[in-house]
Image: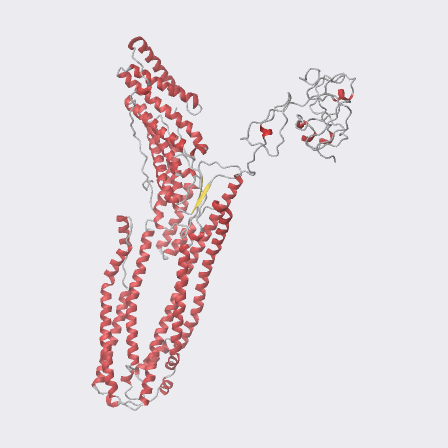
Amino acid sequence: MATFISVPLKKSSEVDLVKPLSKFVTASYPTGEDQAEYIRSVEELNKLRKSALGRPLDKHESSLEILMRYYDQLCAVEPKFPFSENQLCLTFTWKDAFDKGSLFGGSVKLALASLGYEKTCVLFNGAALASQIASEQNLDSDEGLKAAAKYYQLASGAFGHIKDTVLSALNREPTMDISPETVGTLSLIMLAQAQEVFFLKATSDKMKDAIIAKLANQAADFYSDAIKQCQYKENLPKYIYFQEVFPVLAAKHCIMQANAELHQSILAKQKKHFGEEIARLQHATELVKTVASRYDEYVSVKDLSDKISRALTAAKKDNDFIYHDRVPEVKDLEHIGKAALVKATAITPPLSAKFTDLFEKMVPMAVQQSMSVYSQRKAETVNRLVGTMREATNLCNGVLASLNLPAALEDLSGDSIPQSIVEKAHAIVQQGGLQSIEQLIRDLPELLTRNREILDESLKMLDDEESTDSELRSKFSQRWNRTPSGDLYKPLRAEGGNFRSVLDKAVQADQVVKERYNTHCEMIALLCKPEAELTAAIPSANPAKTLQGSEVVSVLRSQLSQLEEVKREREVLEAEIKGVTFDMSSSFLTALAQDGAINEEALSMSQLDQSYGSYSQRVQASLRSQEELLGNVQASHQEFSSLKQSNSEANDREEVLKKLASAHDSYVEITNNLREGTKFYNDLTEILLKFQNKCSDIVFARKTERDELLKELQQSIAREPSAPSFSVPAYQTNPTPTAAGPTPAPRTVFPQQPQAKAQPPERPPPPAFTTQAASAPGNPPSNQPQPVNPPPMAPPSMAQGPPYPTYQGYPGYAYQMPMGYNPYAAYGQYNMPPTMQPNMQPYVPYQQAPAPGQGSYPGAAPTQQHPYIYQQQPQQPPPQPYYPQQ
């Protein structure tokens, strides 16, 4: 009786995990021990997939362990890699487990760039393998019964988990084998079989009949639910698998119900309810007879039937002779209770006892993304503080240059170069002078052009693939059921647009730097000259030695010294700000473990305020100190200027010194700007190369997916009928009854399909006659068996034309066969092979009186006027053929 249902496994195409995952690891993690370890883990993951899916699996627990370990690893790796169509694109292809396909079309399969799809199919295979392992158990032993119940409950839980998660995991319509309707039905079947195993265990342990009856009745109820699923779900009956499973489910429902009635009848007998005992046994007998009559080829119930029959015979005998208890109707019997001892196993990874995470050290993608955003916030904070200090320093230098300080204090003699100017000239020469700036300016366009080419090439790949996708979508319309490339590439195009905007702003910044260089180029060139030429280029003025011991000069020098101290403090403060580090990954991991999500903004802002709050206060204090000192310097310089003797020569000299000081400051700033620009373009090149690789990967994955879909469409087109449906003429399917005689063969141009209407009656065999009798009337009939077809003879002199030829009758008769009737057309000249037609003679119709020596046609009518022979007519012209003569 024990016939259990198992589920076939899905088949997967090979997928290379090493190349795309290793590329992501190399791009996302710096070179070192961690990167090498992650790449080794990727290789191990690829080997694990091949072990789980790349070979036939034995129906053994070790094979299920490999499958579950791969499923656990997928669950662990999913949050650590950005698996999606527009990031880390891996296309997984799986075939329908139940669809056997056709000779030319192949089986139904689906290819998706979704790790959730891979997880769903792997879990389906785990459930299917569990059902196969359970069906192989020895149910005569306690260990076999326990193992079968365990694996059936695991299979039920896995199928139920797929039912709840498949639509959200795929975000599209799945194949029928993993659709919610199908896996929901399979989950019910597995649960019913697990309950049946518990019934068998209770029976073998000889538990109380009341318990066994409840267990059997619960199993029958589970089977009833599974039957309803198979009956009322629209697509399930189309599967051959469910057409084969349905009779087994129906049989098991009856068997479990019969067992429940049998054991409940024993309980009734113990309570001396003999009529109830007989009623239940009669009901059980009817159920077993139903199984034997309808489902005997699937399930054998002979032993159960004999057991029930013996019990019923004994019960009837005792009741007829002793108890005489009334036998109630089945509908009046008390309902048997139910006891569900099975429950679908909850799917909570890890499912494997030997699971170890290959990427244990790798943080989840949510943490990685939060770390990336935190790094951006930190960089913005550092840049804001450092930029504020640099702007203040540039403002200070500009104010001092406009006042010709400190050169005005050093140029009291009026004929020598101020020491500050000499130092600035030496600094410019040491940094490379004009040549270094001009080389940096020449390099910028090349770097810009390289970045533009990378960006344009990346976007062009997207444009080409999107154009191809649009053409195929317009060609196949609804059949081209994959995500449109235009929708898929929106994030990449937005990212590319941001890069283009950054490049445009960089070009504008480069132009500002070039204009500033052109403004100060002459003075910078002067500072690069030897000291003698520099001295000659600076106008001389009347000496102002009387101011050398002045108090205002001492005050100015003290104030300028304080400003220099503020600048030095800023340099130290800038280094401290840039050196602040804090590992936020632990905070993000803790938040993810506790809340299941990361509030990155709140955590990041709190940490940044804590780390940079004191530095921000120090920067503001430095700005206030500079503002106060500059105000004092301007007041002191005004007093200093009023004490100096003012003349045109002194003014010219002071103006040149101001320009030289400003040129030095501009040189330093322009050099820094150009170097930052060069670094910016080089860094942007690396980023754009990663963007290009991302575009290349997704385009390659889309092309692979496109090829798979095209192949699938070709196969589906091959499975479609080659000709449209057509209506068969009425005279071919329902021939008009005529006089006694055979039905003419239909004339069709298309072969009849199996589902066509009833065929016309079979044609009668052709008449057998002897050629010798026809040619020599005096010869007696031969006893030799005659061939069905006459021997080759000369072709008739009259040209023949399809479909109905004219025939030459006996002398004195000139007639033509009816146009709508040709009973032996299938045996005539026109249906014979071409090589035989020239040697065939036309068919001679049945004659009213046989010629001498000619045998009569078997079953011929009595010798009188034949219904198909026209009466003798006066001599008429020869009949015309149906088609024009050649």
Q: Give the residue at the far front of this rendering.
A: 874
Rendered location of residue 44, percent (x, y): 39, 47
Q: Going 27% across and 62% down the picture, which residue do you hit?
A: 580
Question: Can residue 70 be seen in the rendering of this structure?
Answer: no
Rendered location of residue 506, percent (x, y): 39, 67
Q: Going 26% across and 66% down the picture, which residue do you hit?
A: 576
* Depth check, front residue: 717 or 630: 717
Q: Give the residue at the far top of this rendering.
A: 321
User: Eyeballing the image, is 99 above or below 518?
Assistant: above
Q: Quadrant of residue 791?
A: top right
Q: Give the residue at the far left of this rendering.
A: 551
User: Eyeballing the image, is 274 above or below 655?
Assistant: above
Question: Can residue 188 be seen in the rendering of this structure?
Answer: yes
Q: Give the residue at the far bottom of this rendering.
A: 542
Q: Is residue 746 left or right of residue 586?
A: right
* Depth check, front residue: 16 or 858: 858
Rendered location of residue 477, percent (x, y): 49, 47
Rendered location of residue 431, percent (x, y): 37, 75
